[in-house]
Image (cartoon, grey):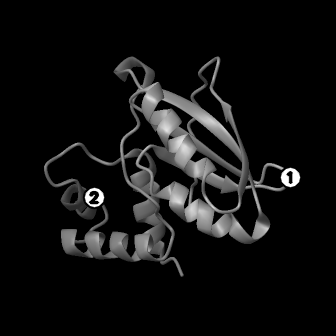
Amino acid sequence: MLTSFDKDLLNILQTGLPIASRPFAEIAESLNADEITVIDRLRYLKEHGYIRRIGAFFDSASLGYVGTLIAAKVEKQHVEAVAKVINNYEGVTHNYERNGVFNLWFTLMVPDCESQQKILKEIAALKGVLRLISLPASKKYKVSVQFKL
């Protein structure tokens, strides 16, 4: 269960992670807490699935990266196992189960097309994966989503 401290911490993390040598100490100060408490709560939130990752967003195209949205058709009994494998790839930023024929959707951002093809080939070979469709963006939209807790 989320405490009010956890909610305040998650609100800050969504848009206000300081660029500093000790960012969690700065966050702790703003929450009238200490750095160890913040780190302990972050560990708890990660272990319990409230946080998947903490990281920066970059303009990937200007850094030479290629990205795509993947629609996957996965046998129902294998969706969870396939999703776990997909989540282990460093370039995966989102992964969602959805209703419909294509029931698992994820984004993949990698340094080059060769890496992308290698990863997609590995995922396509997973037990239960019936089909993958790569849907690279033809236009970029940046949507800032924040969940006020």
- Label 1: element kind: loop
Q: Residues within 10 Å of mark 2 (few under 14, many from 20)?
A: many
Q: Position of residue 23 (x, y in %)?
A: 22, 53
Q: Amino acid at mark 1?
A: Gly
- Label 2: element kind: helix
Q: Looking at this rendering, what residue extends furthest in the right direction?
A: 100
Q: Amino acid at mark 2?
A: Ile
Q: Which mark is residue 109?
A: none
Q: CA distance from mark 2 to mark 1?
A: 41 Å
Residue nearest the observer in this picture, 59 or 98: 98
Left/right of residue 95 with respect to residue 32 in the rendered view = right
Task: Return the residue at label 1.
Answer: 100
Left/right of residue 36 with respect to residue 5 in the rendered view = left
Q: Position of residue 47 (x, y in %)?
A: 42, 75
Residue nearest the observer in this picture, 14 or 55: 55
Location of residue 77 (image quadrant)? bottom right
State if disc 1 and disc 2 touch (CB < 8 Å). Answer: no
Left/right of residue 66 with respect to residue 120 in the rendered view = left
Q: Position of residue 137 (x, y in %)?
A: 63, 24
Task: Return the residue at label 2.
Answer: 27
